[in-house]
Structures are given as structure tokens and as C-alpha cells.
Image (cartoon, helix red, strand yellow):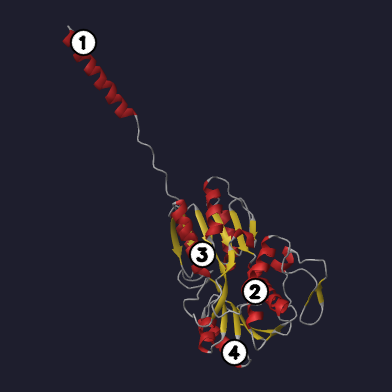
Amino acid sequence: MKKIIIIFVVILLAMVAGIIIITVKPEKKEETVKVGVVLNGYKDDKSWSQSHYEGLEKTAGQLGLEITYKEFVTTDNIAWEIDQFAKDGCKIIVANSAIYAEQIEQASKQYPGIYFYHATGVGEGKNLASYFGRMYQMRYLTGIAAGLQTKTNEIGYVAAFPISEVNRGLNAFTLGVKSVNPDATVYVRWINSWNADEITADTTEKLISEHNIDVLAMHTDSVEPLRVADEHGVMSIGYNIDNSNLYPETYLTAAVWDWEKFYTPHIRKCLQGKFEGVNFWESSDTGIMNISPLSTKADSRISEKIETEMQKLKSDTFDVFYGPVYDNTGKLRIAEGESMTDNAMLNEFDWYVEGVVIDE
């Protein structure tokens, strides 16, 4: 009888175990979020697009994202690329240029289930956020470096377009120069392109050759100004990423981006269901912008002065466009005790500060 009971218990336990094995389902693995990225340049361009690529790769590593990059996308084919991202199941789409404004606005309405992040744009909505950083603050600091470094008091500046974004940076740079060197002049030439290497090189060559320039700054996605400056033995100030390894003998510093510091916290919020559809314009205290390490050939006064001004910017007790500020015709543009509004800086900067010479 005992044997029968034991056998019965064993069978019963086996049956219960079988039920447990059948009914307990394995834990579902969390789905990897797909992200589509549209770049107006190449991810290894040593400039603007590479700065986003490097930042997003760091973010992908932290958040477990699966990212697909489309390089050198034009306004003619971005709509098609976005359609492909949607078909591939991308939940987030990032675009890194203002040239895509119209297409991103339309796509955000066409695909309400996808979240859009648009760098240098101004749009906002339930599934659309735009973002940029107050890079003019770093431009101001690099202007200080140029003003203290120059011996000829003639500084060159090669720039893409005379638009508010570029004018804002140029004016901030010049205010930095003039704050430490009132006798210096900043000569500017326009390329009318973000990344046309041949035109950029030719423009830089002419600017250096026609003036006694010993420090050159740039606001382009092409890195040709750095190469041409190096050929002439002119100290250069870069933009977007640190390219000091390319031209160690002539590279002074650069205004650089660290986009991981934007992408990681904001995409994390998005994944948590806390997407913020606003226009972000981030300050230097976020760490999104910085200046690269100074060259060993930098004037000994530069480091301390930049550190002092950096702390003022981060403490929010000072900003670049505080009055009095005069334009290059002598007109008072910002009165003493006043500051320029964000809207004016973002959308209405069509004038140049004292010390800027448009060299045409």
C-alpha cells in the first residue's frame, strides 16, 4: 500500500511540474529601438556630421539603440529616406541640418508614431523637437584666443552663409577679439556653401594672401581652411570637432560639440514616454559645447582669460551680447544695461559688430 501511495505522489508531482513547465513562459526580451539618422555630410567628415555621429554612437552604446545612418542626404531625397526608415520600423528619426526644415515638418505629421529630432531647426510639436546649442558663447572664447594670439592684428574668418546662425557666431567671435585686443580687425569672406571644398580652399587662399593674417577662424563644414592655413604657417581655430592631430604645428583651438550630452538624456526621456516637443537652445553649462585644448604654442595669457570668461558664462551672470554693442558702421545696436533677445539672435541677426570687415 505504501508503495502505491509513493508511486501516486511521484506521478502527481511530475504532473504538477509538467504543468509549471508548460504554463510558465520565458521572460520576453526587451525590443531594441531602431533609430534612423539623416546627415547632410559624411559621418567621417572631420566636421559637423562627424560630431553627431560620434555623439549618437556613444548614446547608442548607453541606451542599446540600433542606428542606421544615411549620409550626404539632400533635400530632394530626404522624404524617401524617411519613408524607408518608417518601413524599417524606426521609432526615432534624427536630422542634422536646417536645410531639412520643410521635409521634417511634413514627415512629423505624416508619421505621428515616430519621434523626430531636428538639429538647428526651430520646429516643435507632439512628436517633433528641434535643438541647437549657444555655440556663440564658445565662439566668443575662441575670439579671445585669437585676439591674444595675433601679432599682426589681422584675423581671418571663412564662413558659409550670411545667415543669423553664422552672423551670430562671427559677431561673438569678434566681440571676444575686441575684448582683449581693441586694435584687431576680423576680415570675413563668404563661401555660400557648407561643404564645397574647392571653393572653400580658394576663398581661404585669397583671404590669407590679400591680408597680413596670422590667425584664421572658420564656420564651415569643410576643413579646407585648416589645411590652407597650415600651408601658410597661419594659426587656425577650428569648428565642430578637435582636428588638432591633423595640423599640430598651426592648430590653436576649436569650438567643438559633444552631442552625446544632448542625445543621451533626451532620447532616454523619449524611451520613457517623456518626449518633449520643444525647441531647445542649450547653454554652455550643459557641456554640449566646449573649446578644445589649447595648442602648446598658444599665448601664455589665453588659458587663464578663457577660464575666467567660461566660468562667467556658466554662472549665467554674463552673456556675449550685453550692451553697449556698436555695429561696424558706428551705430549703437544694444544699449548699456540691455541684452539681445533670443529671437533676435536666432532669427534677426543681419548686422555686424564693430571690428568686422566683410572682405569681398
Q: Which amino acid does label 4 sit on?
A: Ile
Q: Is any atom of residue 80 visible in this view?
A: no
User: In what element is the residue under mark 4?
Assistant: helix
Q: Which amino acid does label 3 sit on?
A: His
Mark 4, residue position: 208
How far apart are the alpha carbons under marks 4 and 2?
Answer: 20 Å
How far apart are the alpha carbons under marks 3 and 4?
Answer: 30 Å
Task: Report the disc number at residue 166.
Answer: 2
How far apart are the alpha carbons under marks 1 and 3?
Answer: 71 Å
Q: What residue type is labelled 2?
A: Val
Q: Which residue is drawn at 29% across and 21% down?
A: 16
How far apart are the alpha carbons under marks 1 and 4?
Answer: 101 Å
Mark 1, residue position: 5
Residue 356 location, x and y as percent? 71, 82
Q: In this view, does 6 lie to the left or right of 303?
A: left
Task: From the viewer's side, name the closer residue of 247 and 11.
Answer: 247
Q: Mark 1 and 4 residues: CB-CB less than 8 Å, in contact?
A: no
Mark 3, residue position: 52
Q: Is any atom of residue 212 visible in this view?
A: yes
Residue 137 location, x and y as percent? 66, 68
User: In what element is the residue under mark 3?
Assistant: helix
Relative to 293, say whether 274 is above or below: above
Comes first in the chain, label 4 or label 2:
2
How far apart are the alpha carbons under marks 2 and 1?
Answer: 89 Å
